[in-house]
Amino acid sequence: MNTNKSIKSPLDKRRAGILLHPTSLPADFSNGDIGPAAYRFVDFIAHCGFSVWQMLPLGPTHGINGSPYQTLSTHAGNTDLISPILMAERGWINLDDFTVEQKESPNFRTICTYSAWKNLIALPEHSDLQLFQQCCQSHKNWLDDYALFIAIREDQMLNGWTQWPEGLRNREPDALAEVSERLHEKIECIKFGQFSFFIQWQNLKQYANEKGILLFGDLPIFVAHDSADVWAERDNFHLNELGQCSVVAGVPPDYFSETGQRWGNPIYDWKHMLEDNFSWWKKRIQSQIDLYDLIRIDHFRGLQAYWEIPAESETAINGQWIEAPGEELLDQLYDSFDNLALVAEDLGIITPEVEDLRDKFQLPGMKILQFAFSHEADNPYLPHNHSENSVVYTGTHDNDTTLAWATTLNDNDCGYIQNYFKADCSVENLLKWATLSSVAKLAIIPMQDFLNLGIGHRMNTPGTIEGNWNWGFNWEQITEANCQDARQLITMYGRL
C-alpha cells in the first residue's frame, strides 16, 4: 500500500445511529420495504438526532429461512425490498389492477415487477426504459450472470446449481446459449427487477444523505455456495470437479453456541485471488460503495485466519484455523478506492494478529455492552476500556433485546451493573445511556432497544434456522417522548 495514501475514517465525528433492517419497517405488503415507510423512518431518526442508519445485507435471500447472510449474489439487491407503491407512483403499474389475493401474496412484488416490465417495454420511447438499458450496461459485469443464474435456478425447480444438468452446471457455451434463448423473457424481467431495486435504493440513499443520514451496510465475509458468484466464477473457491465443497466455513464454539456455527459457505481460493490481484473482491466492494456510506465487514477476523471445517462434519467443532492474506487484500482495496470507509466486526475469538490487521488499517472495531459485565475490570467491552476508534452497541442483531437480556441476569449481576454506573435505574436504560455516553465515535442502538422491547422481539438466534429475520415494528410503538428523550441524550453527549 502507498503509505502516503490517507485512509478515509468512517468515524469523522461523534454520531449516533439506529440498527434496523428494511424488512422490519412497517409493511404495506408482506414485509417492510424501501418505499414510503423507509422515507418516514429517515425522517424519524433525523428528528431524534440520529445520523446513521445501520442495516443487514441487502442481497437476495434463498427464501428457506430468509437469512440476509446467505444470499444468491454479492452484487444483486433483494427484490423483496422493492416498493409496489413507488412503482405505481412512477407510472409503471396501477395497484388497482391487482386482486386482494395478489396483494396479500408473498410473491406480490414479483407479480408487480413482471407487470411493470411488460408495461414499460410496450413504450419504447419511455425515458425509464432507456434508464433500464443503461443500468443493464453499467452492471453488465455481474448482472448478465446473475439474471441467467436465477432464470436457470427457477427453471430447475430451485435446485442448487451443482444439481443442474452437466452442461449448465459447467457453463458449457452451447448449453448456456440454448437456455438463454429459451428463457430470454424471464432473464430480461429479472434484470428489470434489479433495475427497480437500484433506482429505488439510490433515490432513498440520496434522500437520507440530504437529511444528514449515513447508510451503514453489512458485508458478509463469505458467500453462499448456491449463488451466482460461485457458479459463474468457480476459480475463486475451493471446489471439486462437481462444484461441491470439501471444506466449508464457520466459527468454533463460542458465546453463542457450544458446538460452534457451521455456516457451510465455500472457502476462498486465496492463492488464485492473490495472483488475480483480488479482482473479484474489487468488483464486490464497488457494488457495496454504490449502496452505502459505511461498510461493516462481518467476521473480519476471517481475513486474518478463517475456521475451516470438513464438509462432512455436522457441527463446527472439528475445524482448524487457516491463515488468509487479509493484509494484501486490504492493501489492494485501499489503493483502489478513495472513498472506502470500513468497520471491522471483531467479535468472537480475536487474536493479537487480528487486532494488528485491524489497527494497521485504522479500522474501527465493535464494543457490545451486553458482553461487558463479566465482573472483570479488564473486560474490553466495559465503557472505561472503549476507544474513540470504535462502534459501540447495546447489542447486535445476533443478541436478544437488551430488556430480554436483562431479565436473565441474577441480582448479583444487576447490582454489579448498577454499582458500575453508580445508578439504580433499570439495566436496559443504563446500557442505552452508556452506549451514547461512550468515548466511541459511533454509538448504535437496535430499534428494539430504542423501543424498550423485551422477550419475543429478537431478530436472530445464531446457530438456529427457524423463527429468525421476521421481526418488525409499527409506528404506534413510537412516541414523541421517545424521540425527545433520545435527542436530549444525543445532544448531551455530543452526537447531534
Image (cartoon, helix red, strand yellow):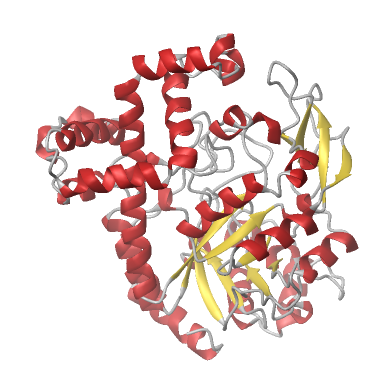
| x 32%, y 30%: residue | 188
State left or right for residue 12 relative to residue 189. right
Classify 423 as above or below 316. below
State left or right for residue 32 relative to residue 485. left
| x 58%, y 81%: residue | 12
| x 71%, y 21%: residue | 244
Q: Position of residue 414 (x, y in %)?
A: 72, 69
State left or right for residue 4 relative to residue 428. right
Q: Position of residue 318 (x, y in %)?
A: 88, 32
Observer able to see residue 258: no
Classify 16 as above or below 297. below
Residues 183 and 465: in front is: 183
Q: Position of residue 440 (x, y in %)?
A: 66, 79
Within the image, what quadrant is residue 43 found in?
bottom left
Residues 162 and 80: in front is: 162
Image quadrant for the N terminus? bottom right
Q: Position of residue 374 (x, y in %)?
A: 82, 66
Classify 200 as above or below 194. below
Residues 363 and 463: in front is: 363
